[in-house]
Amino acid sequence: MPEVTLAHHTAAVNNVQLHYVTAGHGDPVVLLHGWPETWYQWRKIIPPLAQHYTVIAPDMRGLGDSSKPLTGYDKRTVADDIYQLVRRLGFERIFLVGHDWGGPVAYAYACAHRQDVRRLVILDVPIPGAGLEKIPQASRRGGLWHLSFHGVPDLPEQLIAGRERLYLSWFYRTAYNPSAISEEDIDEYVRCYASPGGMRAGFEYYRAIWDDVDHNTENAKTKLSMPVLALGGKYSFGKQTKRSLEALAEDVRGEEIDACGHWVAEEQPAYLTQKLLDFFAEAG
């Protein structure tokens, strides 16, 4: 594979400084990361995708090396940040991929700009209003205990201050294959989240979930018409991702990914790359 150059940029959109990475040439593919990650979660799949497409991987508002405003973490607002960035770069119709919180942001983008999203990919996350908020937060395996914890105003960031690496590493080590995220990778994520305001901004994505539910209840009245690919790790959300999207879109395909937990792009990069290339190629 020819060497791919990753270029780092910053753009001012909606009074936020967004850091983003670009690579390759061709039709645009936008990759939206989740928590507690950054654009860096896509590092293994950007090079092969960039052989065929212009890849744009932003740090969403408040996260990574983007600025950290106090408000605006409902997914409709975050999606508008990304839309403004895409237009700033001179693109209109895109292929859109979202993982974890990037999934609800991608869904909000697709709802607001239905003609501009050629194909939508959601990775290992049900959408608020279509399943995420209904998943048990306590279970024999731990459940989604952190949804409620992160939703408490101000307290989590105070308890975790100075312990960011300990706290965040717990999530990375829940991978089916924990070696998929190395200590050096954790260094990069902790660099971002341990920066001033980094943990608070991440928690704000959780604190906005009920606004997201309200927005998506309205959005769901008209199903998405573009093709949707919904994939979930067998040892994470699994088939729940596809079931969630089937309530929101007319043309959904997808599956459960064997030997994979939540961190799809890092645990199964070759599988994901091929799935994306095949799905995008169908668009012609």
Image (spheres, grey):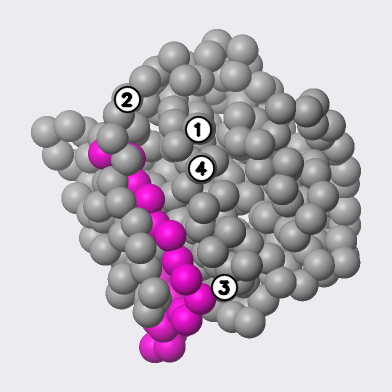
> From the viewer's perspective, is 172 left or right of 51?
left
Residue 231 located left or right of residue 62: left
Q: Tell me the CA gap for discs 4 and 2.
A: 20 Å
Identified at 51% across, 42% down, the residue is 274
**Screen quadrant of the C terminus:** bottom right
* Residue 180 visible to the viewer: yes
In the displayed structure, 87 sits above or below 168; it is below
Cβ atoms at labels 4 and 2 below 8 Å apart: no
Which residue carries the number 3 mark?
110
Residue 138 vs residue 118, the one in the foreground: 118
| Residue on which disc 2 sits | 176
Q: Residue furthest top?
A: 183
Number of dots carrying numbers: 4
Residue 214, given in percent of the width and then of the height, sits at 42, 77
Q: What is the secondary structure assignment of the residue under circle 1?
A: helix
Which residue type carries mark 2? Tyr
